[in-house]
């Protein structure tokens, strides 16, 4: 299987300093994570994302992630939501036309009594 690579047409290049100012949190909320989930993911990944002046980020579409990293669960929950971020820290700004926070924001129907699986993760691509 081919390794994960950032697709420049689907990536955003941002100054790493603005990620700490709430941009990463906003991007994760736009991916459909709850406030708590977005906070956990941002807290986990910010140290790796802010190593250099800029960072390239691509959120992998669920369909692509499902092809490459199947998740088998039994019994099947009412909802499976996966957020996976590819990134590369760099000292050079790259031309990327996509904003990190894209609208409309994904809103997931989460009913309190139905089982839900939320998976978030990332990978640094060199």
Image (spheres, grey):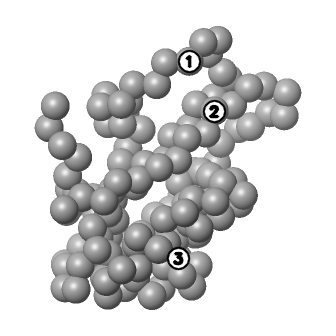
State the quadrant of the C terminus.
Answer: bottom left
| Residue 111, image x, y percentages | 80, 33
Q: If the image is split into quadrants, where does the N terminus sit?
A: top left
Q: Residues within 10 Å of mark 2 (few under 14, many from 20)?
A: few
Determine the image quadrant of residue 69. top left
Please give left or right for residue 16 compared with residue 126 in the image: right
> Mark number for residue 117?
2
In the rendered view, tell whether residue 79 sits above or below residue 54: above
Q: Position of residue 30 (x, y in %)?
A: 56, 59
Q: Secondary structure at mark 3?
A: helix
Position of residue 77 in the picture relative to residue 50 (left or right): right
Q: What's the CA distance linking mark 3 and mark 1?
A: 32 Å
Q: Which residue is mark 1?
A: 73
Residue 76 coordinates in the image, percent (x, y): 62, 15
Taking the spot 19% from the left edge, 78% from the top edge, the residue there is 95
- Decide if residue 108 is in sight here: yes
Looking at the image, which is closer to me, 112 or 89?
89
| Residue 108 in the image: above or below residue 53 | above
Q: Callout 3: 10 Å neighbours few (<14), some, many (20+)?
A: some
Q: Which mark is residue 23?
A: 3
Question: Disc 2 or 3, which lies upstream in sequence?
Answer: 3
Q: In the rendered structure, find residue 54 and report the number of the disc placed on it.
A: none
Q: How many marks?
A: 3
């Amino acid at each position: 299987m081919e390794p994960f690579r950032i697709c420049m047409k689907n990536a955003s290049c941002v100054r790493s300093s603005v990620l700490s100012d709430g941009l990463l949190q906003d991007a994760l909320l736009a991916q459909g994570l709850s406030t708590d989930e977005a906070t956990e993911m941002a807290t986990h990944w910010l140290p790796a994302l802010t190593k250099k002046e800029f960072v390239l980020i691509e959120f992998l579409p669920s369909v692509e992630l499902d092809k490459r990293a199947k998740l088998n669960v039994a019994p099947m929950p009412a909802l499976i939501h996966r957020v996976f971020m590819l990134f590369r820290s760099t000292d050079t700004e790259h031309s990327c036309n996509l904003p990190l926070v894209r609208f409309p924001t994904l809103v997931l129907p989460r009913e309190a009594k139905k089982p839900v699986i939320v998976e978030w993760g990332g990978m640094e691509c060199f």
